[in-house]
Image (cartoon, rainbow, N blue to C red):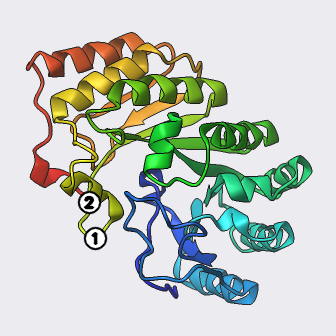
Amino acid sequence: MRYVGDIYRPPSEANSLIVQATIGCSYNKCTFCDMYKDKRFRQRPVEDILDDLRMARSYYPYVERIFLADGDALIMKTERIIEILDTIKDFYPECKRIALYASPQSVRLKTDEELKTLKEHGLYIAYLGLESGNEEILELVNKGETAQEIIKAGQRIRKSGILSSVTVISGLGGTQRWQQHAIDTAKALNAMNPDYIGLLTLMVREGTPMYEQVDSGVIELLSPFQIAEETRLLLEHMDSPGSVFRMNHASNYLSLRGVLNDDKAAMIARLDAAIEGKTHFKCEEYRLL
C-alpha cells in the first residue's frame, strides 16, 4: 500500500484494510488535535485509489473490512466515492464493512438522496466527531461547527441507513465547564441517537493550541476522579435507546461498554466504584494515542 504521512483510524477499524482516499483533514483547526499536521489536505486521484485496491488484493486473500482514510473521505464527490465502493465490491466480494470519517461540512455537501445512494453502494458506517454538545466549549476548541450543525449531520447519516459512530472527548471543557460539557453532550447524543458512541479522554499534546491554553490556565485539566464524575453525569442524562456506548480507547482511565439504555445503571455503578476508590484507574504512562 502507498501511504502519505502517518495514518489514523478509529479503534474499531484495527483489523481493517486501510486505503488512503484523501490526504490529511479537510478542516484540521481543532485546538486539541495534532493529527495530520504534516499534510496539506487533498484528494487522491481516483485511479491511484483504485490501483491501491487492486494491489492489495494480490496480498490479502480475505478482507472483511475496509477503512477509507484520511480525515473526512466523505468530502469527495459522490460519483468518485461510488466508483471506489463499486471497485471494492468487484475486487473484494467478501467485504462486509466499508467505513470512513465524515464531518458536518461533508454531510452538508451531500443531499439525502446521495447519502442513500452511498449506502446502497456499500458504505456501511461513518464516524463523526461531536467532541462536545456545549457551544461555548466547541468555540473554545475551534471546532468550526455548532452543536446543532453536528446534530443535524448525525441525524442525516442515520436517516440514510448508514450506521453512525459519534465521538466525544471527556474532559474537553476542563474543570470550569465539566457539568455543562456532560449535560449538553448528553442532550446532543440523545438528539442524534447514534448507533455507536465512542468516549475518548482528553490528552493534551505539546505543540497544539490547547497545550498553550492549558499552560496559560485558560483550561484546567480534570483528574481521573473528576473524569469519572463527568462521565457519570453524562450517563445520568443519556436517553439514546439502542446506542452502543464504548469507553475503551487507549486514552481512557477506565473502560466501560454497554448498550443504552439497558446497561446505563451498570455502567454508572462501575463509575461509582471507581469514584469510591474500589476500582483502579489506568496509570498515566499507559494512556496512549
- Tell me where residue 219 appears, x and y as whole percent: 27, 45
Where disc 1 sits, the SS reads loop
Instruction: Please give left or right for residue 9 compared with residue 253 in the image.
Output: right
Instruction: Please give left or right for residue 230 compared with residue 217 in the image.
Output: right
Which residue is at a point 58% across and 21% down the rendered structure image? 240
- Tell me where residue 127 appears, x and y as whole percent: 58, 50
Which residue is at a point 48% across and 13% down the rendered structure image? 262
Q: Residue furthest right?
A: 113
The quadrant of the rendering that contains the C terminus is bottom left
Above or below, 1 against 160 in this view is below
Where disc 2 sits, the SS reads helix
Marks 1 & 2, CB-CB < 8 Å contact: yes
- Tell me where residue 236 appears, x and y as whole percent: 41, 13
Rendered image quadrant of residue 114: bottom right
Q: Amino acid at mark 2?
A: Tyr
Pick the residue in front: 33 or 19.
33
Pick the residue in front: 60 or 101.
101
- Is residue 289 in view? no
Q: Amino acid at mark 1?
A: Gly
Residue for badge 1: 207
Which residue is at a point 28% across and 34% down the rendered structure image? 255
Rendered image quadrant of residue 109: bottom right
Above or below, 78 against 102 in this view is below
- Tell me where residue 35 appears, x and y as whole percent: 41, 69
Residue for badge 2: 211
Pick the residue in front: 271 or 67.
271
Instruction: Please give left or right for residue 74 compared with residue 237 in the image.
Output: right
Mark 2 nearby-residue class (10 Å; few <14, some 14–19, many ≥20): some
Above or below, 16 against 60 in this view is above
Q: How far apart are the alpha carbons under marks 1 and 2?
A: 7 Å
